[in-house]
Amino acid sequence: MLNDALIEPGLADFRAEVRAFLEASLPDDLRRAASRATSVFIDPAVTLPWQRILNARGWAAPDWPGEFGGPGWNEVQRYIFAAECAAAGAPGLAPMGLKMVAPVIMHYGTVDQRAHYLPRILSGEDYWCQGFSEPGAGSDLASLQLRAVADGSDYVLNGSKIWTTHAHFANRMFALVRTSTEGKPQAGISFLLLDMATPGITVEPIRTLAGDHEFNQVFFDDVRVPQANRLGGENEGWSVAKHLLTFERGGKYAPGLIGRLERLRAQDGIGPVLRAELDREAIGLTALQALEIKAMRGLGGNPALYASVLKILGTEAAQRIDTLACDIAGPAAWADADGQTPAELAVAVPRYLNDRAASIYAGSNEIQRDLIARLILG
Ligand SMILES: Cc1cc2nc3c(=O)[nH]c(=O)nc-3n(C[C@H](O)[C@H](O)[C@H](O)COP(=O)(O)OP(=O)(O)OC[C@H]3O[C@@H](n4cnc5c(N)ncnc54)[C@H](O)[C@@H]3O)c2cc1C
């Protein structure tokens, strides 16, 4: 629940409107499925129906400006909305389209690209995946090798992308490709928007430690992509990617974590030691909330610095809460044969395992610390 002290006078009515909407419109089956999800990347079978309900109300993309179909809310309204959705147990929507590629299409896209892609992202007609990492290029992303060679009005792509979340569901990918080997590695990268049905693309599943099929390796074998699908200039994809990564890393960790923490605190039979740890996390999350609101309002700091700081604080808090959930669940985490164990406890172990990845994806936390040091120390 959002700390009342962080809500400005005048926004209580807005919060009541959001609560009433969630009460009336969030279907029980979606809420139940979300409560049993073992990853922040929930299957589109759960998220897309909810996205359609939100879109019908004009609320699928709270962060988008009004001119592109957003509701025109200020930062605090957007935060209240996220907090209320989390408290109600609504499934979090996939970020790849709405939160990652959409802002860069707004910023770098042509008039035609905006008109084509943005409405399809809002409605969920297009489901996106992110093709950045490669087998030899993760933290050192600029060393990526997937080659795009100009041929007539197309590029021809050869190589592979890895750890591509939900590529097996996506009909679109945004990808960084190498269009030049001259000069610095960053200077030869372009940003492409691809149709996953293009001949020559193969998606191979990778199983996670938790047993989930969440990400993939994607192979490109003479894949033809129109040059018109490039976002931004040729060899200027690095700037587009940096812009996008700010959206991928920053954001709102606290609302979802507070929702989880509250559901854990509501469990019976928690001893005083674990209660004290839950309380300590609750205090930390209130501070994180305040920092996230400050960051959203652009107060006192470089957005890239905030994005890295919030990514570390949010993902480390998530991993501590996962550990607490396992401690609270105890044997219950292994005894859900009848489906009666409370969801937070029944999925404690797979969530714990899945969230090991949170300090790796979107740029590992070690790399974020490095970025923070460079931004502060120069
Ligand atoms: C669940 C999950 C989903 C993902 N989804 C996607 C996706 O959809 N699309 C996509 O493109 N990518 C995705 N990724 C990839 C992710 O971005 C990379 O895993 C991440 O950037 C790290 O790269 P790497 O795995 O190659 O590790 P490496 O870069 O090899 O790093 C290995 C270890 O070395 C450390 N390290 C590396 N360099 C330094 C340094 N300079 N200083 C200090 N420590 C360093 C890292 O912190 C890490 O601990 C996903 C990853 C995971 C785990």
Image (cartoon, rainbow, N blue to C red):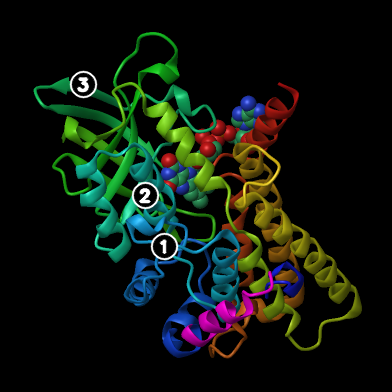
Q: Kindly identify the residue that appears in the image at 36 percent across and 76 percent down.
A: 57
Asked where in the image residue 377 lies, by quadrant, the reply is top right
Judged by its main secondary structure, the magenta piece is: helix
Q: CA distance from mark 2 to mark 1?
A: 10 Å
Which residue is label 3 attached to? 149
Q: Earlier in the sequence, mark 1 or mark 3?
A: 1
- For the image, the number of numbered tags is 3
Asked where in the image residue 291 lies, by quadrant, the reply is bottom right
Determine which of the numbered discs, if any, sits on residue 225 in the image: none
Count residues near mark 2 (Cα–Cα under 10 Å), then give few for <14, some for 14-19, many for 20+.
many
Residue 74, above or below 141: below
Residue 185, above or below 19: above
Which residue is label 1 attached to? 61
Which residue is label 2 attached to? 102
Tell me the quadrant of the picture where the C terminus can be found: top right
Q: Is residue 141 magenta?
A: no
Respond yes or no on whether mark 2 lies under 8 Å from ligand 1: no
Q: Kindly identify the residue that appears in the image at 47 percent across and 84 percent down.
A: 21
